[in-house]
């Protein structure tokens, strides 16, 4: 009987020399596997002369001779470690997948991107970006979320590089190598090094968690691992302190709004005063979003009807907003200095194409950054306990309207929300005055039921 066939191949090094080899020339050392009469090779970064190579050394695996020089021991150790690692990976693969080793599988292990892996050697960042691109092309996500997702993955690569946790490159990791422990480290890094808030970290986790869920569906990741990863979002701590119950830091009270108006009246910086006018207009125009303030055109304004008619950028739906006297007064001020211009406010150039999603995205980011940097200074100077931004105008209008008795459905329509469910989800916690007023209506009836 002949010897039984080995279930997986073992590697050995060879000096790759041509037929007309030269004695004084150095040739590459290659790692070679033979399987089913097919030879699979991978070059190394080692070169040696024929006299410095011993093919029978290291039990036939090949090794450098002493004559190679002072580095021969170290290089032999590196070569041996590499071939033993690949041999053990092949043995492990054969144990999990009996009789399924092919030349392609061996080549995959040699390339350090093994097709033998459950994830087919797919890079996680590359995989996540492909999913983002697919969702964006099918209009499942908007330009903003698409660009934010790409930015998040750039930062994730920075994290891998900074913490040396890449699996096959300093800034790269296979899909199957993603673990809850790695994400725990990522969360800690963003919190301690990037100084991100929990909300920002959760946003950064969104494309990662979605990619992991999809990888699990495709069989590229263990379902049990994905289940633990999906539980990695940071849960907001619920505080019952009186201070937080009174104010959550996202909207201006009537007193704070009056302080802002007083600041506006005495402000000596022209551009900051203009930003404050934009903020106040957004508030009085029923919480108009900053991107719609930025892209507001004179053709959208009907002074006779006291209305603003515009297709909202975020929802792509036509929206009609009744304009109050304060809002009209601000528009009239800008009409005097923007006569003949396309856009109401000087935040974008008149020739900007609103159909160019990338240009619009960049313009919005630039405008928002400029306005918010200026408003943040204003907020500090009037003593606000939170950072003032354009979006605070939207929150402030919604809270003010709800606490003055406007119904949730009316406020939802004024804000341009797709449904009242969205409004309730965001603003239900802002209703202490409204709830108190509603309960007060029951006082008379309840007083007869006291014990």
Image (spheres, grey):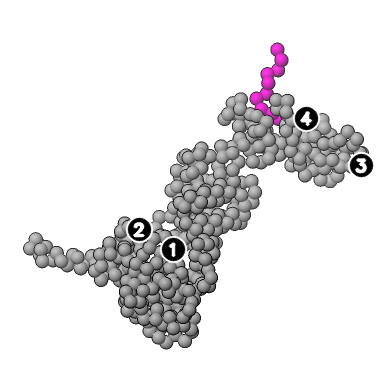
The residue that label 4 is drawn on is 59
- Which is in the foreground here, disc 2 or disc 4? 2
- The residue positioned 52% from the left and 46% from the top of the image is 179
> What is the quadrant of residue 262 in the picture?
bottom left
Q: Quadrant of the N terminus?
A: top right
Provide the residue span drawn in magenta. Answer: 1-10
Q: Quadrant of the C terminus?
A: bottom left
Under circle 3, the secondary element is loop
Mark 2 / mark 3, whichever is N-terminal:
3
**Relative height, residue 35 to residue 21 (above, below):** above
- Around disc 1, counting alpha carbons within 10 Å, would you say few (fewer than 14), some (14 to 19), or many (20 or more)? some
Q: Answer yes or no: do the residues labelled 2 and 4 have beta carbons within 8 Å?
A: no
Residue 397: x percent and y percent? 33, 70
Under circle 4, the secondary element is helix
**Marks 4 and 3, how far apart at CA:** 26 Å
The residue that label 3 is drawn on is 24
Mark 1 / mark 4, whichever is N-terminal:
4
**Relative height, residue 406 to residue 214 (above, below):** below
- The residue positioned 54% from the left and 64% from the top of the image is 359
**Marks 1 and 4, how far apart at CA:** 71 Å
> What is the quadrant of residue 49 in the picture?
top right
Q: Which mark is residue 418?
A: 2
């Amino acid at each position: 009987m002949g010897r039984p066939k080995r279930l997986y191949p073992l590697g050995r090094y060879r000096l790759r020399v041509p037929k007309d080899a030269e004695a004084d020339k150095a040739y590459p050392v290659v790692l070679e596997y033979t399987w089913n009469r097919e030879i699979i090779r991978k070059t190394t970064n080692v070169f040696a002369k024929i006299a410095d190579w011993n093919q029978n050394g290291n039990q036939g695996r090949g090794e450098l001779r002493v004559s190679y020089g002072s580095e021969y021991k170290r290089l032999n150790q590196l070569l041996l470690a590499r071939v033993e690692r690949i041999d053990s990976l092949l043995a492990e693969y054969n144990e999990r997948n009996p009789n399924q080793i092919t030349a392609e599988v061996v080549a995959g292990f040699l390339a350090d991107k093994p097709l033998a892996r459950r994830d087919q050697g797919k890079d996680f960042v590359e995989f996540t970006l492909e999913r983002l691109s697919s969702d964006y092309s099918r209009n499942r996500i908007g330009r903003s979320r698409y660009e934010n997702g790409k930015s998040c993955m750039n930062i994730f690569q920075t994290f891998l590089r900074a913490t040396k946790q890449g699996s096959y490159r300093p800034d790269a990791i296979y899909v199957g190598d993603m673990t809850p422990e790695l994400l725990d480290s990522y969360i800690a890094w963003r919190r301690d090094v990037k100084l991100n808030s929990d909300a920002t970290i959760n946003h950064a986790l969104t494309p990662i968690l979605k990619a992991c869920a999809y990888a699990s569906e495709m069989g590229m990741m263990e379902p049990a691992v994905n289940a633990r990863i999906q539980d990695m979002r940071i849960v907001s701590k619920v505080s019952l302190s009186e201070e937080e119950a009174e104010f959550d830091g996202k909207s201006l009270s009537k007193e704070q709004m009056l302080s802002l108006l007083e600041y506006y009246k005495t402000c000596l910086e022209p551009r900051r005063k203009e930003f404050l006018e934009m903020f106040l207009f957004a508030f009085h125009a029923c919480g108009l979003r900053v991107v719609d303030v930025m892209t507001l055109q004179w053709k959208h304004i009907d002074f006779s009807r006291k209305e603003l008619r515009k297709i909202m950028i975020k929802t792509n739906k036509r929206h009609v907003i009744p304009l109050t006297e304060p809002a009209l007064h601000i528009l009239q001020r800008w009409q005097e200095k923007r006569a003949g211009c396309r856009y109401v406010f000087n935040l974008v150039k008149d020739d900007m194409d609103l159909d160019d999603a990338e240009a619009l995205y960049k313009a919005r980011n630039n405008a928002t950054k400029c306005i918010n940097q200026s408003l943040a200074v204003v907020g500090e100077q009037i003593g606000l306990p939170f950072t003032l931004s354009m979006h605070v105008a939207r929150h402030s209008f919604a809270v003010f309207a709800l606490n003055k008795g406007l119904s949730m459905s009316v406020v939802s329509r004024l804000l341009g929300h797709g449904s009242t469910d969205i409004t309730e989800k965001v603003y239900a916690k802002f209703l202490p005055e409204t709830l108190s007023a509603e309960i007060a209506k029951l006082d008379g009836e309840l007083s007869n039921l006291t014990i």
